[in-house]
């Protein structure tokens, strides 16, 4: 069965044949080095991939620090990745959770618990409290994805929410919240149910987990709406650590609790985490970050790399900041971001 027909069949099974249009057929016909048909997705592969995606509903603790930005009631998707009931999702859904429920495509709802979280990658790992009776989705090789590759995006809701998209970019992504990926996956057209959604390659394997809706998927500054996915390749080295210890091995990076926006080579402070390191050091919304020590910083990536190079969490970060019309030097004692989160009461 040919690759084009396999792809159209997978789209039809997902209830999204209209998305797999003439352009998709043309792309599928294009020859690609090493793109044989032996690894093409079958109809059974598509069904298995769809059934491995579960709905994740979270109620955060009442005084969660993240409630102001994420709300206390959160919902997204997760992907069952092994027969132990482990579910990978995007971490911001489940941080500071009070209770979690997961629901399979067949409508079976079970409680779940947070097993692990990793701020550096953005992944969260859950485990259902009883067998889900769902075939897990195997992890693929996200590194092999190339621009123009067709992919399936699967979120909770089954065929009705499944869609076909293209990889439109592989490039670094720097988030305003002290977050940096070296080789994020960008797809288009966008799905509006991106949080924790599964990005599935043509072999029916998981290659990414949905994180964001973006306006410039193909290239920074060029308007093309799409989604950013976190590659599963960066989950693999830490997966056993998350299962065993709840976090990756080694020392955590320094975190100071700032969100910034880059404007014409300057970083403007747009949010300061309440009672976080930057807040305690006297940084305010509207300040402009000029540098770390004597070094100028002009972008998110520049700021993060210089800050993380200072040392692990607990290191003192010397920031040079423009406040009103005065340049001030502030010493910010960094922390492990996980320790900033509130914990669910045990009583």
Image (cartoon, rainbow, N blue to C red):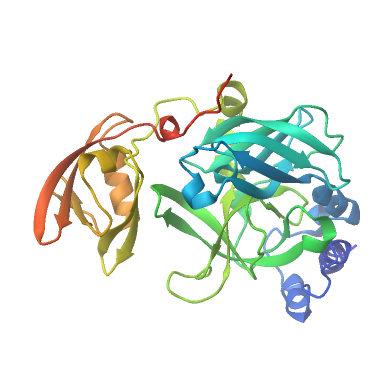
Q: How many marks?
A: 0
Which quadrant of the figure contains the N terminus?
A: bottom right
Which quadrant of the figure contains the C terminus?
A: top right
Residue at the left extreme of this rendering: 326
Residue nearest the viewer, comparing 117 with 56: 56
Residue at the bottom extreme of this rendering: 22
Q: Quadrant of residue 243?
A: top right
Q: Quadrant of residue 46?
A: bottom right
Left/right placement of residue 234 relative to residue 22 reads left
Residue 263: % across, % down? 30, 67
Q: Residue drawn 82% across and 39% down?
A: 109
Left/right placement of residue 242 relative to residue 198 reads left
Q: Is residue 43 above or below residue 256?
A: below
Q: Residue drawn 40% across and 31% down?
A: 252
Residue 121: % across, % down? 50, 42
Residue 45: % across, % down? 85, 51
Q: Residue drawn 87% across and 34% down?
A: 133
Residue 205: % across, % down? 74, 48
Q: Is residue 252 above or below residue 197?
A: above
Q: Residue drawn 57% across and 72% down?
A: 225
């Amino acid at each position: 069965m040919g690759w084009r027909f396999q792809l159209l069949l997978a789209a039809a099974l997902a209830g999204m044949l209209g998305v797999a249009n003439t352009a998709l057929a043309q792309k599928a016909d294009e020859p690609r080095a090493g793109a044989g048909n032996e690894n093409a997705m079958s109809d059974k592969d598509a069904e298995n991939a769809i059934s491995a995606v579960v709905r994740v509903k979270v109620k955060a603790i009442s005084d969660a620090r993240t409630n102001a930005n994420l709300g206390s009631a959160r919902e997204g998707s997760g992907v069952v990745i092994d027969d132990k009931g482990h579910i990978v999702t995007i971490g911001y859904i489940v941080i500071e959770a009070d209770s979690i429920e997961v629901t399979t495509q067949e409508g079976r709802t079970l409680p779940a618990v947070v097993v692990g979280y990793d701020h550096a990658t953005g992944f969260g790992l859950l485990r259902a409290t009883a067998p889900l009776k769902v075939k897990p989705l195997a992890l693929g090789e996200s590194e092999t994805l190339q621009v123009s590759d067709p992919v399936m995006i699967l979120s909770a809701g089954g065929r009705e929410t499944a869609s076909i998209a293209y990889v439109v970019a592989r490039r670094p992504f720097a988030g305003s919240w002290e977050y940096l990926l070296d080789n994020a996956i960008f797809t288009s057209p966008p799905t509006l149910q991106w949080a924790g959604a599964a990005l599935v390659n043509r072999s029916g394997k998981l290659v990414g987990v949905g994180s964001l809706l973006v306006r410039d998927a193909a290239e920074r500054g060029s308007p093309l709406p799409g989604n950013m996915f976190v590659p599963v390749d960066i989950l693999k080295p830490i997966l056993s650590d998350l299962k065993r210890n709840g976090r990756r091995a080694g020392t955590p990076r320094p975190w100071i609790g700032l969100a910034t926006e880059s404007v014409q080579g300057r970083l403007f402070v747009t949010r300061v985490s309440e009672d976080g390191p930057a807040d305690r050091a006297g940084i305010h919304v509207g300040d402009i970050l000029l540098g770390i020590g004597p070094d100028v910083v002009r972008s998110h990536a520049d700021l993060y790399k210089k800050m993380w190079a200072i040392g692990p969490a607990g290191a003192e970060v010397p920031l040079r900041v423009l406040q009103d019309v005065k340049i001030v030097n502030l010493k910010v004692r960094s922390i492990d971001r996980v320790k900033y989160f509130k914990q669910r009461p045990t009583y």
